[in-house]
Amino acid sequence: MKFDFFKMHGAGNDFVVLADPDARFPLADADLARAFCAPHSGVACEGLLVLRPAEAAGADLRMVFFNPDGSRAAMCGNGLRCAAFAAHLAGLAAGPVLVIETDAGLLSAELLSADPATGRATVRARTSPPRDRRPAVRPAGSAREFFFVDSGVPHAVAFVADLAAVDVAAEGAAARHAPEFAPAGTNVDFARVLGPHALALRTYERGVEAETAACGTGAIAAAVAAVETGRCASPVDVRVAFGDVLRVEAEPGPDGLCRDILFTGPARLVVRGVADADWVRP
């Protein structure tokens, strides 16, 4: 099975995007998804995005996201922006605004700018409303208190005074598997407030099982946690480890909760070509 593919990154979070207009990719084949993501023998990335025809009414296309370990994730914020840009590059999108079906529901993405010649785009997405908040969770044995929120996928956010001093690998792994976040586990974010509209962020990602250069749903979760606890006001510019800044617009309602989320940031094309599933199968 041959697929047009795009190696892309959103603020340093890198993906392989497969154009699958005939819905041929076997979504139940976790081994194949894992093989595409593998370093050395695969394309080496933090997630595989498969773009295929929509199944839900009102959607333009469907995005299926696989973690490097072959597991499915409901949504990926940086991946959503890359998927929108890739859809235009692949001729799967008729206009600048797309409604994309995900396992987290129907989300929209708008290309604010796109230059195929340089492989650069800026995309604004409207993501799913945050849910399942637990504002003060302290896992057993941890000195930190986390704000838990599902921003498309689960995140636990801790606010810290010195971001550079955090052992993200150790603390992230411990919190990711903490019983308080069972059974699904959680992504883990460490955020430092830089100003009334600014955060810096480091993230340990579930499924990657390591710190990553950026996490879009993590930026959303951190911004929501900061706004709802009074640490920041919307919009919040979140500087990720890669160095790029992601803007999160999250105005709280009368009850103090953020529901309507806009998320803006870059999408970059690195390589495009043709991939054959037989080349990467174990």
Image: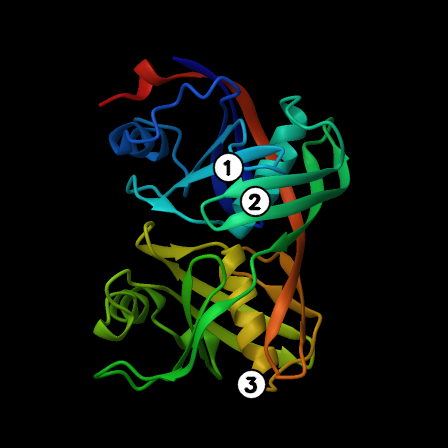
The residue where tag 3 is placed is: 229
Front label number (2 vs 1):
1
Dot 1: element: strand
Quarter occupied by the C terminus: top left
**x then y, percent, for residue 237:** 66, 67
Mark 2 vs mark 1, CA separation in Å? 8 Å
Q: Are marks 2 and 1 in contact (CB under 8 Å)?
A: yes
13 w.r.t. 236: above or below: above
Q: Nearer the viewer, residue 20 or 195?
A: 20
Q: Amino acid at mark 2?
A: Leu
- The numbered mark at residue 63 is 1
123 w.r.t. 250: above or below: above
158 w.r.t. 7: above or below: below
**x then y, percent, for residue 142:** 27, 83
Dot 2: element: helix
Going by the image, does 73 lie left or right of 241? left
Front label number (1 vs 3):
1
The residue where tag 2 is placed is: 80
Q: Nearer the viewer, residue 102 or 232?
A: 102
Q: Earlier in the sequence, mark 3 or mark 2?
A: 2
